[in-house]
Image (cartoon, helix red, strand yellow):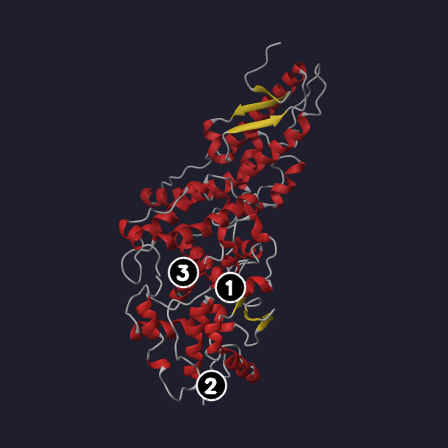
Amino acid sequence: MALCSFIEKRRNRYYFRSRLPVDLVPIVGRTHVVISLGTADPPTAKFRAAFCMQSLTYCAAIIRLAMRPSNDILDAGQNPVETLAWEAFELGRRYAAEEAALRQYFLSRLKELASTVRQRTDLDNPGPIMFTATSPSPVDLASWRSCAAPASSPANVPANFGSQTDATIRDDARVSWPWHRFQEEFLRDKPDLCPKTVLSYNQAFRTWKTLIGDKAIGAIRRADLKLFADHLRDRDNPRGGKLNQKTIVRSLAHLKTFVSWAVGAGLVANDGFSAVTARGMTRAEKFDGNSRRAFTNTELDRLFSSPLFLKKWPSQEDMAMRWFLLVAALTGARTEEIATAPAVLVRIGDIDCLDLREVGRKTSAAPRLIPIMPTLMRMGFRDWANTQAERGYTLVQPGPAQRPASSWSKRLNRYIHKNVADDPKLVLYSLRHNFRQMLRAANIGDELADKIFGHSSDKVGAGYGRELSPDEARLFVSAIRPPIGFFGLYIRKAA
């Protein structure tokens, strides 16, 4: 027996597959409907497919009638141009709200149809289709539209719209809420975000709100995301020129993550948001590469023979600055890690280690132990750490008040630009680049280098033995060599 064109066989089972009418695709957010018929018997499949087609045809008619304009936007008693502009705006907002509600209605009908069609066995008496007497008739549509909320407030699906299973749709009128009402809910589902990343997300949200306003979350489309990407592309950088391509990619990724979360929560139809991309890199950006560079050996010599390291009677402030620069150069720790690192050293075998297990938060590999190089020990690092611990201070705390990482970064960047080189790419974080070069030159292997450096690895073996072993610590201190000699540099205690 020949089957209909909208029945296809997959893995010895029959499926109903039909293309949706073009005018319904933007509303329901899909181009085709595929439903398992739950049978391998051709006559049963043909009967159930006809049932599906009849039900979907009726559902499409309901949606078309619901979206039909029911009022005349011209009012003879007012200025026709002003009335047309205002009513067009109001109708657009109402259309977006109704579209979101009808999409939920369609998806609910589709779910109910999929669960019902496989139970139909009365081939001789098809009976009524799944939309019962409680489904809306064309006469009910006027009352449904009249009881819908105004366009300026979230629209709700009325109680008489659809069968009893539509209660979930009426309760989930959240699809017509303004999108920014879901920011806090989204961030609660991302508890691992650090405060700096949360701030970056909120900055992206504020910018997007200036572009699309209070748009209903169910009405968010790919064009809204592209509008944000275009805005960043053309936006001026306060420091001059246009925004860097990496900044645009990061901000756009925040919004992509948000809309992906909304799609997963059933609030937004998947409109191919991943297809939106940031602008490409300019020729200058391609050749400039990283925004930071490593120190040359000459620049390192200049830094560690600068006035800060030549003072005979350094203050506690000077001492803290000295050790901050040395720890950054000879451990590769991040600025925020050094600023809050404890003064108490941890001993692994016979090697003292800097303990970043509680302060490393950048990546999953950031909590770690870093073996202290002999060069740093010869400068008196253990004495300094013990003194700081006796005072109840952290490793580089200059006084009773803890100094935040941002303050350290600004202070030491100014010092570097004044005493080494006035190059915007040469900053405190550049010392971390130098440390990575030292790890490569030591040839201790990528896994151990990443473990000490605090970088995550995608290799399977990296997940085994993540704790630093005495043999690994000993290998590190024996193989690593600083690029310059720190001869005669002994950091005495502050007076």
Residue tagged by mark 2? 493
Secondary structure beneath dot 1 equals: helix
Asked if one can make out residue 479 in the rendered structure from this viewpoint, the answer is yes
Viewer can see residue 368: no
What number is the disc on residue 97? none
Mark in the foreground, 2 or 1: 1
Residue 380 lies, in percent from the top left, at: 48, 80
Q: Quadrant of the N terminus?
A: top right
- The picture quadrant where one finds residue 206 is bottom left
Q: CA distance from mark 2 to mark 1?
A: 28 Å
The answer for how far apart the CA atoms under marks 1 and 3 are is 14 Å
- Tell me, for residue 437, which label it has, or none: 3
Tell how many labels: 3
Where disc 3 sits, the SS reads helix
Residue at position x 38%, y 69% in the image: 428
Residue 200 placement: quadrant? bottom left
